[in-house]
Amino acid sequence: MKILKLIFKNSFRHKLRTTLTIFGISIAVIAFGLLRTVVTAWYSSVKAASANRLIVRQSVSFIFPLPYSYREKIAQVPGVKEVTFANWFGGTYIDKNNFFARLAVDADTYFEVYNEFVLPKDQLDTFKKERNSCVIGADIAKKYHLKLGDVMTLDGDIYPGRWEFVVRGIYQPKFKSTDAMQMLFHWSYLDETMKQEMPGRAGDVGWFVVLINDPAQSASISNQIDGIFNNSTAETKTETEAAFQQGFIQSSSAIITSMNFISFVIIGIIMLVLGNTMIMSARERTREYAVLKTLGFSGKHLAGIILGESLLISFLGGGIGLLLTFPIVSGFSQFIPKGIFPVFEIEPITIIFSCGSAILIGIVAALFPIQRALTTKIVDGIRFSG
Amino acid sequence: MADIIQVKNVSKSYWRDSIETSVLHDISLDIKEGEFMALMGPSGSGKTTLLNLISGIDKPTRGEIIINGTDISRLNESSLAKWRSNNIGFVFQFYNLIPVLTAFENVELPILLTKLSKAERKQHVETALNIVGLNDRMDHYPKQLSGGQEQRVAIARAIVTDPVILVADEPTGDLDRNSAGEILILMERLNQEFNKTILMVTHDPHAASKAHVIRHLEKGDLIQETV
């Protein structure tokens, strides 16, 4: 028999109590993993942002448009390689719950700037030629069973009316973090319609996307662009794509902070649960610890036995919880509307946090029982009848 | 025979809420190697306290305890733990076996801390269980054994390290007459065949009659010697 066997046998002395504790830790680790996955998914758009892309938007708010005429001036700023632009279209596809980004873009340049949207050349060429065509992400095609040549009808809200687009391209995401739930169509098609029906909104662009040669120059290029439009009717705010995405997330910062906080509160609660189990176990074994001391076991040995037991329970709970987190997160992602999170999967940092938490829980829960076992005198321990 | 245990002017007091309770008063006692001594006396007379001091699980307030040439009252906790594992075998009234371990595993506990190989440990445990007549109960858990058998496992655990001294605190106190008789025969055998020095606390005159020497304690004082 080895000490490890004693630790194992001690851990399962009260099978129901230990099983419930392991179950509790597992549930906590699953909840922790799920919450952390939501938080990291929220930030995935920031991580996916390109360092050599800048976003130019209206300085007052993102919802106010910029004149199309800014494009030429921006393109002349030294260090700028390409300028493209997009408009948020909104609208409804079949049902209001079908959420995905619908953007009116510059067909000639958009796919050069967003080269992570991989589109076959023949499809791109066809898209560029047809004004009422669109390109959709592979996830949209899969979800709505769309193929090339199908017609997508949108009911406009920001841009009223019934809009029909022919699918001429289906792009594949280059990276795992690339959003494959976007529908892109010609801004010129939208603009021409606006010129006829709502002339006051013609020539408006939602934001410009600026491809730069050197990401290290992003700050100075941003300043130069904003300097050009200072004191104009539509002043600009230029920032990196990551900062722009971060700005979106800031609007939900209270929710994210709460989720972060709750995920760590869960760890704290389960620490107390395991701590309670260990305290009860150690109290019940006060006499046994005293007997072990009489047999020559030192304080170090007893500390090792108690810590080992606590770590065994926390590892079992943490391990089971972590293993179950993968299918649960995967199942959970099926219920999240596509397009909200481009990536919804367990990040390595979440696994590290979960494992680290299991170790921390095991250590912290053992501290008080160890202290009690070490400070109880043998003669008091042997007389103990609790 | 030389004195293996020398208790010199030992006193022991306990403090509770700043009130001192004196349990042993200036006790001096010598026990020779291979001797079987019984300590008797009424409850609260200090028998178990004296046993605890001699076995190194408690420290005297004053005086010296020299066991086999070592003044154990000067040892620190970790040295004392090591000393106990090499020199003392404990037998308790309520056996104090670990319930989740088999008889074999309980007996193996004290030698887990040694450098003995698995095969050597097995040999030691089997020898100890053989001496107490329980080699056919090695794989039994304490709850599958009778009280007498549990106490015999506890004795096997006490002798597995081959200590020079056995201390027993009311070893027959929780047993029926027959089982108590078997335990006493076993202790006599350990004393006579294996030359173990035994110090036994007991209330039972019959148990005490097996000892070579009986010492009585009353209110913390040694009052007489019976041979």
Image: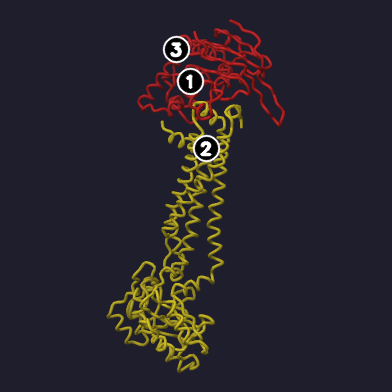
Chain colours: A yellow, B red
For disc 3, the marked residue is B194
From the viewer's perspective, is B61 left or right of A97? right
B76 in relation to A123, above or below:
above
Q: CA distance from mark 1 to mark 2?
A: 35 Å
Residue B81 in the image: state x and y as whole percent: 50, 27
Q: Can the viewer see residue B179 in this picture?
A: no
Query: Camera-side residue: B115 or A143?
Result: B115
Residue A339 in the image: state x and y as whole percent: 44, 71
Residue at 54%, 72% in the rendered image? A251
For disc 1, the marked residue is B87
For disc 2, the marked residue is A14
Q: Residue type at mark 3?
A: Phe
At mark 3, the secondary structure is helix
Judged by depth in the image, the label closer to the viewer, 3 or 1, is 1
Q: Residue type at mark 1?
A: Asn
Q: Residue type at mark 2?
A: His
Q: Chain of mark 1?
A: B
Residue A310 in the image: state x and y as whole percent: 50, 42
At mark 1, the secondary structure is helix
